[in-house]
Image (cartoon, rainbow, N blue to C red):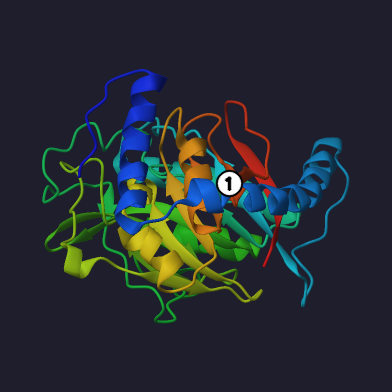
Amino acid sequence: RRARPCSVGRACAWYWLVSHVVTLCRAEALPWWKRRLRPAMATARATAVAATALVVAMVLGAPAAAGSPSGSSHYMAAAVQFESQAAPSGAPRDTLLLNIAGMAALANAAAGEGADVVVFPEFGAYGGGFTGKCSAPTDKSAYCETYPEGGAGANPCVSGSGPASLVAASCAARNASVMASFNLCDARPEGNYNAQLVFGADGTLLANYHKSHPWQQKCFVEPPAADIEHVIVDAPFGVKFGVFTCKDILYNDPAAVLAKQYGIKHFLYSAAIPLIGADAARLFTVAHNVTLVMGNLQSGQTGVFTDGHRLTAAPKSGNQITMAAVLK
């Protein structure tokens, strides 16, 4: 079942979200509103204490440890709200590099506050110049470059090979010594994919996930069901992360499949959902008893969510880092 089209307004947006989630939960016989909500909230309150302490420390300027110590029961998750810009030259490649440089500065700031992993929003690199102009996913676009598959040990920052945007994102993670997730456009022979690239703290490309359910179908390829990717990243601090992007949250595959069939409890999630992005994250995490680290392009939606509870304060407008200590 596809979403009923909505133009404006929170009420219509809620209908769009709830119609998908209710349909999915009925199909899976998941009465999460009865079985999950109360125990999940109790667990989340305890976890929120540590998160609140961290947020207060950040606001007051108190020092933070550089990453979680080895053997720690928690890791530090940073979710970033980012306002992308168009380069003064108007050149797509300049725009990509300008925005990745801005995200690199935020990665450094998050690492300085002790982050182990940082997630940036969907479309954060584009500056608004791509998705409003594309007419078909097979169109050639200077915003889209060809990136390698993850997991092969490639380290673009060290080797200097690959597109400039790939090297810049790799170096952003390496220079900050933090695992980082960026959303880019991966150009393949069959068309352009909305891609979420995850880099290790040394700049190694760990994953290149192609979004399964793109909202902008004039811009991005929608892979057939048989080709949906189930991407899992092993973090060196002892956590397995599932990866999916924005609208994927409304579908069973890959999001719910990763949680139920693969047992994944932590997710790196880039999104650009206005108004109800945080609501979608709450619903997903309470339904599957998981943690979602969500970088959202839209104001006030970014955050870290566990078992239906938001562990971070809603960010105001502009570039903002939200962080929480998450139980592994």
Please indicate, yes or no, whether residue 101 appears anywhere in the rendered image.
Answer: no
Please, what is the three-letter code of the amino acid marked with disc 1?
Answer: Gly
**Residue at horizontal 47 percent and vertical 32 percent from the top:** 298
Q: In this orientation, which residue lies closer to the viewer: 236 or 163? A: 236
Q: Given the current orientation, which residue lies at the most extreme bottom position?
A: 152
Q: In the picture shown, does residue 251 fall above or below 87?
A: below
**Residue at horizontal 46 percent and vertical 44 percent from the top:** 121
Quarter of the picture containing the C terminus is bottom right
Instruction: Please provide percent x and percent y for residue 37.
Output: 58, 47
Q: Would you call the spot at circle 1 few (<14 residues within 10 Å), some (14-19), or many (20 or more)?
A: many
Q: In the picture shown, does residue 157 fall above or below 36?
A: below
Determine which quarter of the picture holds residue 172: bottom right
Q: Secondary structure at mark 1?
A: loop
Quarter of the picture containing the N terminus is top left
Please indicate, yes or no, whether residue 270 appears anywhere in the rendered image.
Answer: yes
Instruction: Please provide percent x and percent y for residue 168.
Output: 47, 57
Determine which quarter of the picture holds residue 226: bottom left
Instruction: Please provide percent x and percent y for residue 109.
Output: 69, 48
**Direction from residue 135 to residue 159 in the image, left or right:** right
**Residue at horizontal 43 percent and vertical 74 percent from the top:** 262
Residue designated by label 1: 308
**Direction from residue 206 to residue 7 in the image, left or right:** left
> How many marks can you see?
1
**Direction from residue 6 to residue 318 in the image, left or right:** right
Instruction: Please provide percent x and percent y for residue 210.
Output: 30, 60
